[in-house]
Image: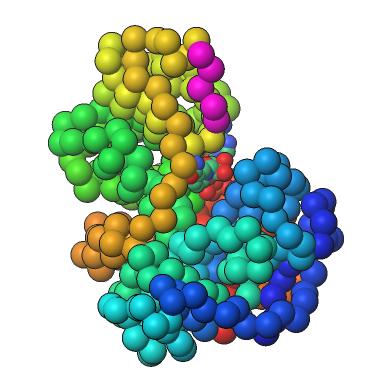
């Protein structure tokens, strides 16, 4: 099968097309013919070697951690999914380096799968798992946002931020967010109550007494400054210092836990029209396409998700 892989850490030119064997399945896995995947900042961070300490991968490494496609084979112990099911998932990260999603076929553990809603395309579905699950887990499970809470989402126009704004609004929160000016009207159209241009305005000049902060841009001190006593801050982009953790406010970091059941719930919110999937751009599964997609993501100003169409 065709895959896009790196043979060493480095710049985008290291992304090359290679031929790989179709992955062999464990008993609890399904084989997915991949129709679309998407880019997340973890992809280019991994390419640059920033995750060396976490994942001792064997090269060549196929990057990519979102898939939407059709099941073509099931392992012996798979109970709830069958050949022909249209699915989407954030697969596990495998140390062999060969099971990333920049590939025509992907092996995915059953517990990471959800049925793709018929109402959305494979490209839209591939934009959801990693970013959407991160937003859902932070807003619902970690920050425990509820009706009437005042919530700040830093980085509202990003892949995670856009899901987070819509999930928090669905829960009945008052939502402030940060973004460049060109995105303000768009974020308001998705429900944001207040949008702050982070280039011009310090957030503590305009916000205070917030119940919760979701930090997707590593600006922890800025978030802490507007939280009320005992308010909660979760970052997915930085490591809180000892000093920040010792504050009277609750500060923690979060790493996404892939989960098919939760992904299914997110799919229901999308079908119900509560959450829209916002796609910045679509590229093809070629070395040139994936390089251009990495470049776009690394520039840091995509509005929504960058998708790779595989089939
Ligand atoms: N821990 C985890 O499990 C986990 C999971 C997912 C993502 N992450 C991390 O979370 C971060 C965000 O991910 P993502 O997928 O949302 O990234 P993304 O889609 O690449 O984010 C791009 C957006 O960031 C905004 N932005 C850049 N700098 C900003 C700033 N200083 N203040 C406010 N907005 C800013 C840009 O908005 P404008 O164009 O409006 O400036 C742009 O829309 C990344 O570092 C990623 O690695 C972690």
Question: Which quadrant, please, contains the N terminus?
Answer: bottom right
Which quadrant does ligand 1 occupy?
top right
- On screen, residue 87 versus residue 231, left or right, reads right
Image coords of residue 121 (percent x, y)? 41, 77
Identify which residue is drawn at 28% across, 40% down.
141
Identify which residue is drawn at 52% across, 83% down.
33
Q: Judge by depth and name the residue closer to the eye, 192 or 33.
A: 33
Visible residue check, residue 215: no
- On screen, residue 110 versus residue 98, left or right, reads left
Magenta span covers which residues? Answer: 238-242
Q: Judge by depth and name the residue closer to the eye, 263 or 207.
A: 263
As displayed, is residue 31 above or below residue 109? below
Q: How is the image coloured?
A: rainbow
As displayed, is residue 61 above or below residue 25? above
Visible residue check, residue 167: yes
As displayed, is residue 145 above or below residue 7? above
Question: Which quadrant, please, contains the C terminus?
Answer: bottom right
Image coords of residue 263 (percent x, y)? 33, 61
Identify which residue is drawn at 15% across, 36% down.
147
Instruction: Tell me, yes or no, whether the highlighted magenta stretch contains residue 125.
Output: no
Quadrant location of residue 97? bottom right
As displayed, is residue 159 above or below residue 99? above
* Count of all numbered marks drawn on residues in the image: 0
Main SS of the magenta part reads loop
- On screen, residue 287 versus residue 206, left or right, reads right
Image coords of residue 123 (percent x, y)? 48, 72
Quadrant location of residue 204? top left
């Amino acid at each position: 099968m065709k895959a896009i892989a790196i043979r060493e850490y480095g710049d985008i030119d290291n992304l090359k097309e290679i031929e790989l064997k179709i992955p062999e399945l464990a008993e609890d896995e399904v084989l997915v013919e991949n129709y679309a995947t998407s880019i997340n900042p973890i992809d280019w961070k991994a390419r640059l070697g920033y995750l060396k300490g976490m994942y001792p991968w064997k090269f060549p490494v196929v990057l990519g951690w979102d898939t939407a496609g059709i099941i073509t084979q099931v392992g012996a112990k798979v109970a709830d999914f069958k050949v022909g099911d249209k699915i989407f998932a954030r697969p596990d990260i495998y140390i062999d380096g060969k099971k990333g999603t920049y590939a025509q076929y992907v092996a995915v553990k059953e517990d990471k799968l959800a049925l793709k809603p018929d109402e959305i395309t494979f490209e839209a579905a591939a934009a959801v798992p990693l970013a959407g699950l991160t937003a859902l887990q932070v807003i619902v499970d970690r920050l425990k946002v509820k009706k009437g809470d005042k919530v700040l989402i830093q980085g509202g126009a990003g892949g995670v931020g856009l899901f987070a704004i819509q999930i928090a609004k669905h829960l009945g929160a008052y939502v402030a967010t940060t973004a460049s000016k060109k995105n303000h009207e768009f974020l308001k159209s998705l429900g944001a109550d207040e949008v702050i241009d982070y280039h011009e305005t310090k957030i503590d000049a305009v916000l205070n007494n917030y119940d919760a902060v979701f930090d997707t841009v590593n600006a922890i001190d800025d978030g802490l400054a507007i939280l009320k006593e005992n308010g909660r801050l979760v970052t997915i982009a930085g490591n809180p210092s000892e000093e920040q953790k010792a504050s009277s406010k609750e500060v923690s970091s979060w790493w996404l836990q892939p989960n098919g059941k939760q992904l299914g719930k997110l799919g229901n919110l999308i079908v119900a029209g509560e959450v829209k999937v916002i796609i910045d751009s679509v590229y093809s599964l070629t070395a040139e396409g994936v390089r251009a997609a990495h470049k776009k993501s690394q520039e840091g100003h995509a509005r929504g998700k960058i998708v790779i169409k595989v089939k």
